[in-house]
Amino acid sequence: MPINRIASRTRSWFALRRSALVLLAASGCSEQVCPNTGQRGSLLVARVDPHVEEGGVAFDQLGDSADSGVALCRDILYADGHALLKLMGDSATVTENNGLAVIGGVATSIPAYRHDKIAYVAVQSFARSRRALVLPNPDHPVDMTLWPRPALLHLKRSGLTQGRAYQTAVREGLLP
């Protein structure tokens, strides 16, 4: 049986790439590095709230305390994965395995690390996997706002299409 050299190389390339991702995630931020040297930050999570008069969007905060649940490590913002999912209205579990997040029992390519039995996930990668938008605070690099897809769709339905969140979501292909 002939061997397809291109397919063989492709499989090898993907295996090598996945191994490199695991090594980068594991070496980038770890239990020994981030909790001790990472800057504490905060993350606002947008949610639809009909009781809010202007715009119908409220924000819940994760972080900004002594044990914040949000840390900037080597220029990547990480957040407590379980708390983040809960704020987004999702009840899935989050664990870490070999430097990557496992969400609801499904392995992902989202960089993660574990600290005090809590899985911290890279916020940008996590948001992309959930078709959500992350907007950094221009004045404070350790503070960001996460716009889950339902909140972005609410902006569209409400005609609130001139703001930074909506415009960025359209530009990044998250909304039509």
Image (cartoon, rainbow, N blue to C red):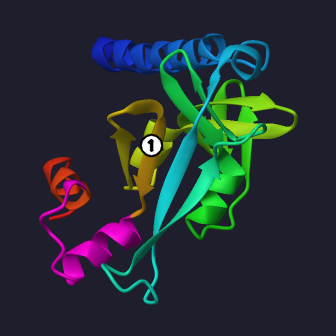
Mark 1, residue position: 144
Which quarter of the figure is the N terminus placed in? Answer: top left
| Residue 58 locus on image (x, y percent) | 46, 72
SS at mark 1 in the image: strand
Asked if the stretch drawn in magenta spans residue 158, the answer is yes
Q: Is residue 168 left or right of residue 37?
A: left
The stretch of residues the image draws in magenta is: 149-164
Vertical relation: 175 (above or below) 34? below
Extreme right residue here?
116
* Residue 155 in sight in this render: yes
> Which of these two is toward me, 90 or 14?
90
**What's the residue at 86%, 37% (across, down)?**
117
User: Which quarter of the picture shows residue 55?
Assistant: bottom left
Question: Where in the figure is residue 104, as x and y percent of width and height?
Answer: 68, 56
Tell me the residue at 55%/13% (across/down). 24
**Corner quadrant of residue 124:** top left
